[in-house]
Structure formats: C-alpha cells, structure tokens
Image (spheres, grey):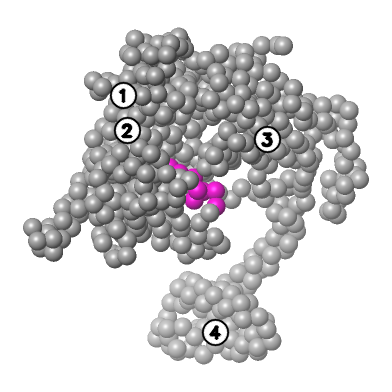
C-alpha cells in the first residue's frame, strides 16, 4: 500500500495524494469529486489531529507514519463494509415493493431544551420580535408589512367599493380575503402561490374573523378586499396574517370594533408554548390560533389543529389570550406612531 | 306561527329570537341545551359502507367506495361533497377541507386498519383506498354535525373482503392485477374512532348577555354573534375546534366540551348496540 503523507498545517508533501489525484482525474462526475474531497478533507483533519504530535520536523516520523497508515486503512475498511451492508439492506428496507417508506420524522423532537429554552433561544412564553411598516402600497387604501421573527407578511386592503352585484348584501359589507404564499416562502419551492386547499381554508378563516371585527353595517351593499401575501413562512402564518390585516385595515381607516391581534399557541407535555416557529409546528403537536379584539376577552377566531386533551384547554386559552394582549400592545403602538407621522400631512 | 310572529320574524329577527331564547326555548319548542333528534340508518346507499343521517332540518347520506392499491404514503381516504344547489361553493369547499384535515390526522380510522389481509389474518403488501362521497339532501341546520355522524356511521358499516395474493412476498417483481383475488369472506373495519361534532351558537341579547345555543338552525345561526364547531373523540379529547364571531366569555369552551362529550357517549352507545 502506498505510504500516506499529509499536507497539513506543517506544509509536508503528500506522496499518495498524487496517486489519488490520478484516480480523481478519471472521475467524470463533479459531484463524486466533491464528495470525495469532503471525505478526504475530513479524514485529513481527523488523522492530523489524532496522529501528528511532533512539529519539530517537516517529515513524518516512524510512529506518526504507522498511526496515519492504520487510521486510513481502518477508515477505508469501515466505509467499504458500510457500503456493502447498505447495498444489501437498502432494497429490502427502503425500497421494498408494497411497503410504505419508513417514517423518518422524529416524533420526539425536543422543542424545549432541558434548560427551558427553545431552538431560537426564546422561553416558552416569549414571542418573536415584531417589526411593522404601514402604508407601503400607495395604490391600496391601506397596506401593512409585518414580521414575526422570520415570518413576513404583506397585506393590502382595497375598499370599501361597490362589488359584484351577485355578492352584494343589502344591509352590510362583504369581506373578501385572499391568502397566498410566494413560491419561495417555504423550504420547498411551491408550484402554485394560491388556489390550493390550504390557501382557500386560510382565506375563509380570515374572512370569518374580520366579518366580526369590521363594522360591516357602516357600508351596506359594498365590498372590502383583503389580500395577504406570505413572503417568508416560518410558522404562525395565520396569526401573522390576522395581525397584518388588522394594521392594513387601520391604515385604510375602515371602522372596526378594535384592533384584532392573534397568536398561535402550542402545547408540549401540558405546557403552553407561544408564537410557534415552523420547526416547532408538526403534525402531532396540538396548537391553537386565537384572535381577540383589543387584547380583551372578545374572541373573534379560534382554530385548533391536532388533538388536544381537554385538561390542557383552559391553560392554553389563558396563555394565548394573555399573549394576544401583548401583541395588541405592540400593534397599538405602531398605529399610534403611524397616526402621529400622518398628522402633519392631514393638517391636524 | 301567527301572522304577527311571522311578521316580527321578518322585520326584526333578533327581537323575535330573543323573546324565545330569553325564556329558555327555541321557537320550535326545544330547550336551549337539547339537540334535535338524530337518526341514522346504515347500509342504505350502496358502496362497501353507507349511511343516511337525519338531524333536525339536515339530511345527509354518505357512501364509501373501496379500491386496492400497493401500500404507499399517499392519502388513503379521500372525501368529497357532491355539488348541490343548497350549498355555495365556498361552504362546500370548507366542509371538504375540514373532512380532509380530519382524515389526514387519522381521526376517523388509522392507516394500519386499511391494510389488506388474507384469510389467515396476515397483512399483505396491499392497502384499501376509500372514497367517501357525501350527498346533502337538506341543509337547514348544522351540516357539519350530520356529516361527521354520517361518515362515522358509514365507516362502521364498511365491510371489506379478504384478499388472496398469488404472489410471493419475497418476490421483488411487480404484483400483477390478476394475482390479486377477492375472497367471499369480508370483515368490518377495525378501530373506527367515533367522533361527535356539535355546533354551538352564541346569541347576544340586548342586555349584553350571551346565550349558548346547541345546534341552532340556519336562521338562528345567522343571528348569533359567534359560531363554534367542536369535534370530540372521547370524553377527554378535542379533535377539532373552530370558532369565529364576537364572543366575550372564555368559559363557554368548557360548557361546549361537556355537552359534546355527553352527546358523544350517547352516540357511541347507540352505534355499539347490536342491530
């Protein structure tokens, strides 16, 4: 077997690398080359750290040579053995005809560490940073941009205007919502930004919520359109859309019973966790999206996902209500600042 | 209904309903915390399982068709609501997405229960795919309540034949259609979870008091300040909860859960009773 020398931090020449480079030149696939280089660099680093002890010479001494050879040989043997076992077992386990693929999700993902912190460093009761801007879209009656951590939502409000005759209601205004996610908003690129089942469901939830918030009797026979676009999705999308729509309606000057504020609250082992990020939202954890008016007891939207034990319901609802009040405080400050900024223009 | 009450209902519906609800009864004489009579019949509408459910002014039929496929990760049970003039497209889509959500969660029946079995009770690398079709005959009331009941009843009625597979399990070649044979014996679906759906309305009186209405009809629901739908799968587990409208009292959710759980118990006992 060719002796192996490593060119590491000491600057020594590696004789066997040339043999490897000759082999590499025959490797057509660039991906294979990359993978090979990754393995090589990792191996070099590990072997250097484990075997090289003497920095007084620019050549490997006998002990270091022996150590490095054994290291490489063992690594190669293990890799070869691993590939043989994989080649034998993979067709049976992963690709067996008529079998479902094995479940790769980790149902026991630790959302909260033993010290009580979440993956992004927050406590269970902490919400993400909220950044907002109002009045971005000059062509809309009202618009807003909101960030809940990495979840970013744009909202535009049009109306009230005289909508389609078929949809007109004599004594009140019709609220029409559209929910869409940009194709680049999530981890995987979406094919359709809107029109799928989930978007339709979200739009309907938003419509129902804002039918209770907007004083619809003020605008009979008319329509208000609310368009929410999720630019970046990192969990609690519905709550972010409710908050964005609330700000946009305030920017449009549409009379409401109050500012609606929303939050998504999950339950882990009986303990509530507020403002969930996308990593924390999974198919097993029950979560409630709650929206209230002015942070008070007045609930305009409740949406539960996944099964929830009835004993956890009061705790999670109380926590969600308190968090809605906190979010409302943030939104209220934003609206007041926006009004102060607009006051000189209006002439007040 | 006299002419004057009919006129009051048209001119001032809120006042009309408040006069009855404040006295603790619905206009049709039902007490506030009682539900309309729920009746169901199984096996009347074709397919491998079916049911016909009637509750108050709502009548819904559910039929289930089955097909066989190789085990896969795709959705095994699909649901659709047949188009009807009684429902708008939005409402129909809402009901369908709610059903699909429940099916995806495995709330009605687990994936393992749909595995094909042979006469010896062994699992085969095949699974049943079920297609649930809901037909709405009349929609004057709480549709979701009746639809969930009909799906549960129809799944309980499902009888799937055993399969004989003339293909060795160790054989890696693809399974041909002619190797799958249906036996005369059939078995019911195991582990069909019983769900109970209840719709509640919260009526706000002029004095600001909230009155809880159980399974109100469409007119009463239109005059309610808030509407909640709760689905439970036992005395302690809430499967789905949606609510919208303006509602002031948080304790209502506890009341909803206790009413729903009692109704679930009665429904389960009725389903388990041998016919």
Question: Which chain letter goes with mark 2?
Answer: B
Q: Do labels 1 and 2 touch, CB within 8 Å?
A: yes
Circles 4 and 3: CB atoms closer than 8 Å? no
Front residue of this view, candidates A242 and B123? A242
Q: Are marks 4 and 1 on the same chain?
A: no
Q: Main secondary structure of the magenta part?
A: helix
| Sequence order check, earlier mark of 3 and 1 | 3
Q: Which residues are magenta?
A: A196-207
- Taking the image as drawn, is residue A346 in sight? yes
Earlier-in-chain disc, 2 versus 3: 3
Q: Which residue is mark 2?
A: B246
**Residue that numbered label 4 is attached to:** A5
Quadrant in the picture for the C terminus of chain B:
top right
- Identify the disc placed on residue B133: 3
Say which quarter of the image contains residue B86.
Answer: top right
For mark 4, name the chain: A
- Indicate the chain on which mark 1 is placed: B
* Same chain? Circles 2 and 3: yes
**Observer-nearest of A273 and A254:** A254
Comparing marks 4 and 1, which lies closer to the viewer? 1
Q: Position of residue B128 (x, y in %)?
A: 75, 38
Residue on which the image places disc 1: B204
Q: CA distance from mark 4 to mark 2?
A: 76 Å
Disc with the residue nearer the chain's start (1 vs 2): 1
Q: Please tell me which residue is depicted at 49% across the width and 85% down the height of the picture.
A: A7
Judged from the image, the secondary structure of the residue bearing numbered disc 2 is strand
- Judged from the image, the secondary structure of the residue bearing numbered disc 4 is loop
Q: Is residue A226 magenta?
A: no
Instruction: Estimate how packed mark 2 is, as few (under 14), some (14 to 19) or many (20 or more) residues with alpha carbons within 10 Å.
Output: many
Q: Are marks 2 and 3 in contact (CB under 8 Å)?
A: no
Q: Are discs 1 and 2 both within one chain?
A: yes
Above/below status of B12 relative to A200: above
């Amino acid at each position: 077997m060719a002796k192996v020398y490593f060119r590491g931090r000491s600057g020594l020449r590696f004789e066997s690398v040339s043999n490897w480079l000759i082999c590499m030149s025959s490797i057509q696939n660039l991906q294979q080359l990359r993978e090979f280089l990754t393995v090589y660099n990792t191996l070099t680093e590990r072997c250097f750290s484990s075997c090289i002890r003497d920095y007084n010479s620019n050549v490997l001494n006998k002990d270091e040579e022996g150590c490095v050879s054994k290291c490489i040989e063992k690594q190669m043997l293990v890799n070869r053995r691993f590939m043989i076992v994989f080649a034998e077992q993979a067709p049976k386990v992963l690709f067996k005809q008529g079998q479902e693929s094995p479940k790769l999700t980790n149902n026991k993902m630790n959302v909260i560490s033993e010290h009580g912190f979440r993956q992004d460093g927050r406590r269970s009761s902490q919400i993400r940073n909220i950044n907002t801007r109002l009045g971005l879209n000059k062509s809309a009656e009202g618009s807003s941009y909101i960030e809940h951590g990495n979840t970013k939502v744009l909202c535009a409000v049009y109306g009230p205007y005289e909508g389609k005759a078929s949809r007109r209601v004599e004594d009140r205004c019709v609220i029409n919502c559209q929910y869409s996610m940009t194709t680049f908003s999530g981890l995987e690129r979406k094919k359709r930004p809107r029109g799928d089942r989930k978007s339709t469901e979200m739009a309907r939830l938003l419509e129902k919520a804002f039918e209770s918030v907007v004083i619809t009797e003020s605008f009979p026979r008319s329509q208000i359109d609310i368009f929410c676009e999720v630019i970046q999705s990192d969990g609690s999308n519905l709550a972010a859309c409710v908050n964005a729509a609330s700000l946009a309606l305030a920017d449009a000057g549409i009379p409401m019973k109050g500012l609606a504020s929303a939050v998504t609250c999950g339950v882990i082992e009986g303990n509530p966790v507020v403002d969930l990020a996308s990593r924390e939202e999974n198919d097993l954890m029950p979560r409630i999206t709650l929206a209230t008016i002015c942070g008070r007891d007045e609930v305009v939207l409740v949406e539960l996902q996944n099964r929830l034990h009835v004993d956890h319901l009061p705790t999670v609802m109380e926590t969600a209500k308190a968090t809605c009040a906190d979010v409302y405080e943030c939104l209220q400050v934003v609206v007041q600042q926006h009004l102060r900024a607009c006051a000189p223009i209006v002439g007040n | 209904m006299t002419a004057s009450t009919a006129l009051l209902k048209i001119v001032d519906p809120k006042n009309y309903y408040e006069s009855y609800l404040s006295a603790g009864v619905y206009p049709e004489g039902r007490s506030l915390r009682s539900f309309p009579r729920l009746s169901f019949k199984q096996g009347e509408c074709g397919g491998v399982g079916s049911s016909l459910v009637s509750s108050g002014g709502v009548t819904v039929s559910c039929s289930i068709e089955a097909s066989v496929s190789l085990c896969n990760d795709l959705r095994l049970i699909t649901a659709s609501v047949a188009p009807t003039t009684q429902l708008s497209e939005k409402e129909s889509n809402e009901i369908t997405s709610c059903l699909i959500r429940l099916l995806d969660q495995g709330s009605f029946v687990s994936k393992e229960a749909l595995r094909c079995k042979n006469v010896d009770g062994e699992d085969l690398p095949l699974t049943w795919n079920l297609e649930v079709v809901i037909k709405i005959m009349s929609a004057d009331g709480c549709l979701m309540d009746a639809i969930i009941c009909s799906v549960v009843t129809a799944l309980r009625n499902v009888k799937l034949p055993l399969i004989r597979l003339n293909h060795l399990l160790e054989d890696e070649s693809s399974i041909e259609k002619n190797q799958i044979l249906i036996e005369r014996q059939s078995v019911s679906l195991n582990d069909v979870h019983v769900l109970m759906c209840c719709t509640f309305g919260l009526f706000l009186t002029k004095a600001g008091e909230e009155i809880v209405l159980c399974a109100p009809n469409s007119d009463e629901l239109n005059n309610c300040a808030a509407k909640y739908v709760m689905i439970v799968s036992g005395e302690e587990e809430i499967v789905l909860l949606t609510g919208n409208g303006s509602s002031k009292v948080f304790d209502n959710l506890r009341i909803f859960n206790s009413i729903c759980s009692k109704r679930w118990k009665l429904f389960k006992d009725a389903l388990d009773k041998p016919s």
